[in-house]
Image (cartoon, rainbow, N blue to C red):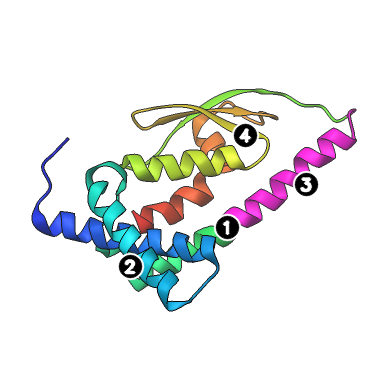
Amino acid sequence: MPTLTFSEKLSRFIVNSVFMMLVWIAFTSSFATHELIVGALTSMIISYLSIRLFTCCTISIFNPVKIFYMIWYLFVFLWALINSNLDVARRVLTPSLPINPGIVKFKTKLTTNYSKMVLANSITLTPGTLTIDIVDDTFYIHWIDVKTTDPEKAFTDIAEQFEKILLKIF
């Protein structure tokens, strides 16, 4: 693992502490002063101890443009989730509909492991697709109804909408 500079460690510490504090608030559902103090201290201790293990992002993630794209990504993902749920429900309720399951592959332009992980999880969480493997920049996806084996067309159908936004975030 590469050695981190002090500014990288500090930046990761801040990002990790903020996100852990948000999780703390979500779990406790409390803004009581003593809860916030304990949450802040706990978040900072865990962030300090796990800086090299769990933090992918620096403070640049708090850039307002990136925050906008994160929110936009959430809406795009939710729309894809709804559409894919309806498609799978239609296939379950209408057994006569043909399915054509298979594995497709495509390449991504994403460079960081974290952004690839977000893309893989987004694909897997939308019903009808499952990320099987990622080798370098190639994704292998099980698709409930393979419409094409052409990697570029498969990429367009499965992942393009996600990747466009992730490239602006990471």
Q: Disc 2 residue type?
A: Phe
Q: CA distance from mark 1 to mark 3?
A: 16 Å
Label located before the other in sequence (1 or 3): 1
The quadrant where residue 150 appears? top right
Which residue carries the number 2 mark? 62
Q: Which residue is mark 3?
A: 86
CA gap, disc 4 and disc 3 = 13 Å
Instruction: Identify the mark at residue 150; answer none if there is no mark.
Output: none
What residue does disc 1 label?
76
Residue 44: percent from the left, percent from the top?
Answer: 28, 60
| Closer to viewer: mark 1 or mark 2 | 2
Give how far apart the Cα atoms at labels 3 and 2 are.
34 Å
Give the camera-side residue of 7 and 95: 7
Disc 4 marks a residue whose amino acid type is: Thr
Residue wearing tag 4:
129
Dot 1: within a 10 Å radius of its alpha carbon, few (fewer than 14), some, or many (20 or more) residues? some
State the separation of the CA atoms marked 4 and 2: 31 Å
Tell which residue pokes out farthest to the top in this image: 102
Q: Position of residue 53 (x, y in %)?
A: 27, 41
Left or right of 59 on screen, residue 7: left
Residue 119 in the magenta stretch? The answer is no
Q: Main secondary structure of the magenta part?
A: helix
